[in-house]
Image (spheres, grey):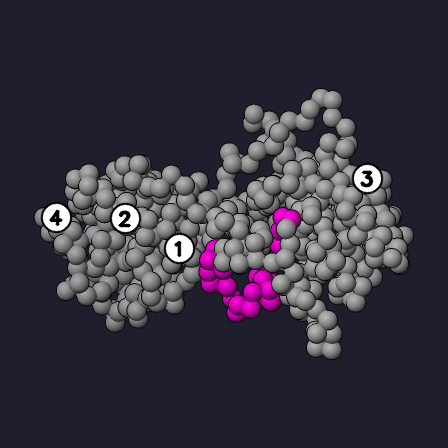
Amino acid sequence: MNLYTADQMREADRRAIEERGIPSIQLMENAAMAVVREVRALPIPGPGLDGPIGWISEDGHIPDSEEVAEFWAMRRRSAIVWCGPGNNGGDGVAAARLLLEMGWLVKCVLVGDRAKMTADCLEMERRLAEEGGVLEDFDPENWEQYMPFDVAIDAMFGVGLHRDLGPDAALAAQMTRRGTGWVVSVDVPSGIHADTGAVMGSAVRADVTVTFSRGKPGLYVGQGAVHSGRVVIAGIGIPDDLYPKRAQTVLVGREDVYLSPRPVDAHKGNFGKLFILAGSRGYTGAAALCARAAVRGGAGLVTLAVPEDVYPILAAKCCDEVMVWPLPPDDDAVVKKAKGCTAAVIGPGLGQGERARRLVYRLLEELACPVVLDADGLNIISGHINDAVATLSRHIDVLDRREGLTVLTPHDGEFARLDGCGLPIRDRLGLARRFAGKHRCVTVLKGYRTVTAFPGGSCAVNPTGNPGMAKGGSGDALAGLMGGLLAQRAQPEEAAKAVWLHGRAGDLAAEDRGEYGMTPTDLIKRIPYAMKELLDKE
């Protein structure tokens, strides 16, 4: 699914009004109707802790079940609508009027300067008044009047916000969650940057976000993905041809991930040879997980090159499917072995010793095949070593000299060391895109909603995965799976495919084992099932 920036959305809106003659007020009415549809579909709580069960009247009467049912049948649904002075606020005022017409109890509150209300927002206030509603000014001193309600609708700010929320808006954002009901945001949760997903000071945390016409990147990455809840994309009448056919950012769906059926006369040589340089004393698990995932990902032959002192351990761990190879003393022999393969993974559990650093740089400089650089491989090229040997490292400029495809798989901390940016990373999309272009590599910035950035400027956001994957070893499995896919097909998009499959396998593991108890080994065992799902859809 294509995701469009705030500027692209505003331009499509402008063209719809100015070039196609669609009244802006009609677009606002359509937006309000979309919000109201989702609000009315919410399962508003019935009798329970907030109902009359357990209530005792002044004369000591306790209501029976029939009286409880009658109370809830007569009870009107209620909503508070927080509105800004702009057109996002106009959407909220229109939604308030529609709910009022449907019999809801509605409180509509303006957070901001009345003098800055747009013409369309003023028109919606007039229409609300005709139905007996009032757009009240926010009174932060009397906060009790703003709770509780069945639904809080956040229509303070939309895609145009580029600064931190002011004090009143920040307070209102906090108050949306103080009631007992649902929180529904209009277009973008107020306080979330529509392009980056960054929280601007503070932000509304919605259960549902009704966004208009197209998805926005900030709803799917970073804290924006956390604050947006379930995202509903609602058409409001803007013609499809007013949007660019291709967007720089996409949300990867199952329909975007393709696996080819294997030829009936295939042999192991058809599916690539993967070389993995990994493992060290105390870190044998990383190497084993990486190799197992590569096999599960379909690589024809997997060679796991490990230091000789841990060879017996890994030979036992990897059993029969992986060819565990003890590193010979001669670096030339290692490079030669790697050159005989169609892809390489470098780094899981490798350590940062002198020989590890030497081999990382030689392999990056001399291999023409795709290379996945992970974990200690990333630390080595970022110069994450002690000062005494820092002058021996050529650091990250080795990426710029490579001709072959390079895929980097950092988490936020590793990326910060590579890029020199600070933590926390507020703009994961922007920084990953810039880094990939600068160093001509595919950058897989791992984390919630992993971002895969390509050298040409495009980015893929991954929606699969769950918190149960936040365990040591999950990243090693991703590196191995990615290497296995690249060994079979040396194309950059295999990186985003691996991320999707890795997350989907994690979701299958969580369904079976639960998020607390699942392990990276459980994830790896389910890679074939995730791949089978893709083949079964054909």
CB atoms of marks 4 and 1 within 8 Å: no
- Residue at x 86% of width, y 49% of height: 325
Q: Name the front one of labels 4 and 2.
A: 2
- Tell me: 196 left or right of 447: left
- Taking the image as shown, residue 409 lies to the left or right of residue 195, namely right
Real-space Cα separation, disc 4 to disc 1, in angstroms: 33 Å
Residue named by callout 3: 321
**Under tag 3, what secondary structure?**
loop
- Mark 2 or 1: the one toward you: 2
On screen, residue 505 versus residue 184, left or right, reads right
Labels 4, 1: front one: 1
Q: Residue 360, which numbered label? A: none
- The answer to which of 356 and 308 lies nearer the viewer is 356
Q: Which of marks 3 and 2 is in front?
A: 2
- The residue at the point 25 percent across, 46 percent down is 13
Q: Disc 4 designates what residue?
A: 127
Instruction: Identify residue type, mark 1.
Output: Asp
> Residue sitting at 60 percent across and 58 percent down?
400
Judging by the rendered image, the residue that carries numbered circle 1 is 195
Classify residue 412 by image quadrant.
bottom right
Q: How far apart are marks 2 and 1 (CA)?
A: 15 Å
Q: Earlier in the sequence, mark 4 or mark 1?
A: 4
Question: Label 4 neighbourhood size at 10 Å, few (<14), some (14-19), many (20+)?
Answer: some
Looking at the image, residue 154 lies above or below residue 321: below
The residue under the point 27% across, 36% down is 239
Sequence-first disc among 4 and 3: 4
Q: Give the range drawn in magenta.
A: 404-431
Q: What residue type is labelled 4?
A: Arg
Task: Kindly check if marks 2 and 1 are in contact, taking CB atoms under 8 A apart as contact.
Answer: no
